[in-house]
Image: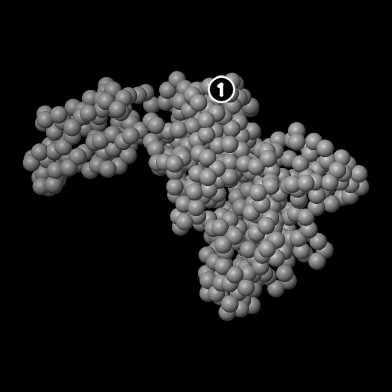
Amino acid sequence: MKKILLLILFLLLLSACTPKDIITVDENGYLIVNGVKTEYYVQNPETFDIKIGINNDGYWVINNEVTTHPQNEKLVTEIKNGYLHVFGVQTNIKIEVKEKKVSPNYQNHGGLFPDVKPEMLASQYWIDLYNNCDELIMTKEEINSFNEKTINTKNTNTVNLLNYPNTITKNELIEKINKYQIPQYNYLDNKIITSEDKNFLLEKRNINAIDDVVIVRYGIITNNTSMRSFPTDKRITSTLDGDFDYFQETGLKIGDGVIILHQTEDKMWSFVRCENYEGWIKTKDIGFCSKEVFQDFLNTENFIVVLANKLRLFNSSYTKENADITLYMGTKIPILKNPPMTIDRRSTIGCYVALIPRTNTDGNLNLISVPIPMTEDVHNGYLDYTITNLFNQAIKLLGTPYGWGDMDFNRDCSSTVSAIYKCFGFVMPRNTSNQDDLPGKSLSITNALPGSLIFTPGHVLLYLGKVDGHHYVLHNFSKYRTSPTSETYQAMCCHITTLDLYRANGATYLYSISKIIALDN
């Protein structure tokens, strides 16, 4: 009896609530109950038109008909025979709902993800889904204007290095360095981290040596290198032999420009600002130069862009200066406008002569001339921004390994899409939390454009298209499930999947979409 009285009292309190909508449908077809997204979605969200409200007695009103279930704040818990159940009680809301898809058991021994066909691994498959794929999406002038908007959007964390101030204050620099805190993880190089370890890392930053006014210096990256949150090669992980090193922030590539702001006492590490990040890198991977050389190198009109996933330069029989140099997709390298006939006894006919940055023994920048055959996967200037070129570039990254923060010179989700879009001259924010503020078109899944960036919590995917009711994406990811409750599988690779794939938290990518942006005017 007491429980019944409490229930009656509860319903009376609900009846006093201000009437409001209970169930709506978002643009992707998902039911929204009291403002909270559920895991259920309707067959045709475009035609869904059920009016939901409550009357003065606290009962649901659906299409002007009073139901038998009072309002409450609980989510839809299930659907039986087409009727919504709220808090275990059946309502009279009957909706045609898509079958909740559960991916078939996926045996992780090669093959493809569910609903992915072999022909989908070719860029032409996706190109054929669309019309006018060779038309420009944006001109180079429009991309430059887009980049200005990106840089002027604070949360993208991007800067124009050519306009970087000549000095910064001590307090500004300390704030930049102190934004990195030692993560609350247990293992440093697979040993329990100690307070002494932490103090050593903090002291190594050499903050006490910072002048009141810091005069910046300039440099070009001469070796592919890692940017770290602290000046150390030691890995900090959540478990023994953990996959993710949480000191790893990003990778810098040969030819990237950096502003040098500070160094450790032994000069082995430098705190630098690049186009879309700041942190610690090894000083030996920088070629120091004057501001004029820095600006000329970055602002040259004569350059090639690497289109291959990786391009390893030929070793010369006569010099080892260009030995073991690997250039990555999206890398921009200056070329000689009027090259000599030969370099190191090698003809330059049929070659671009690239100016590869190296570091002299005194730490300064030295540009060496290296012939790169025109038959290599490079392009004179930026690629035209078309659907064809976009998909051709994206497919080249299939199967490439996942690397948290570009660990081991691999890529994570955000640096994967960055590599693709850099081929067209876009300034790309580094992390997903910055990329989702790009000044592009905001879209829904129903009108997503080819190449749109789809954001879920902590992840970004590149949209390919819709086939047989499935939305397909290319993305570089670490883990997934085959059902909401299955074990977690390792991916650690760039794949094509549908948005019906389950994330490590048990929700589908489709359900988890927070934002979709097309890089378009």
State left or right for residue 136 relative to residue 92. right
Q: Position of residue 51 (x, y in %)?
A: 18, 32
Q: On screen, 268 above or below 105?
A: below
Question: What residue is drawn where x is 88% and y is 42%?
Answer: 346
Q: On screen, 231 above or below 265?
A: above
Question: What residue is drawn where x is 87% and y is 40%?
Answer: 347
In the depicted view, which residue is nearer to us: 236 or 420? Answer: 420
Q: Position of residue 185 (x, y in %)?
A: 56, 58
Q: Amino acid at mark 1?
A: Tyr
Per the image, the residue denoted by label 1 is 125
State left or right for residue 519 relative to residue 17. right
Outermost residue, front direction?
A: 338
- The quadrant of the rendering that contains the C terminus is top left
Q: On screen, 78 above or below 160?
A: above
Residue 199 visible in the snapshot: no
- The quadrant of the rendering that contains the N terminus is top left
Question: What residue is drawn where x is 17% and y is 42%?
Answer: 20
Secondary structure beneath label 1: helix
Question: What residue is drawn where x is 45% and y is 36%?
Answer: 509
State left or right for residue 16 relative to residue 238. left
In the depicted view, which residue is nearer to us: 386 or 286? Answer: 386
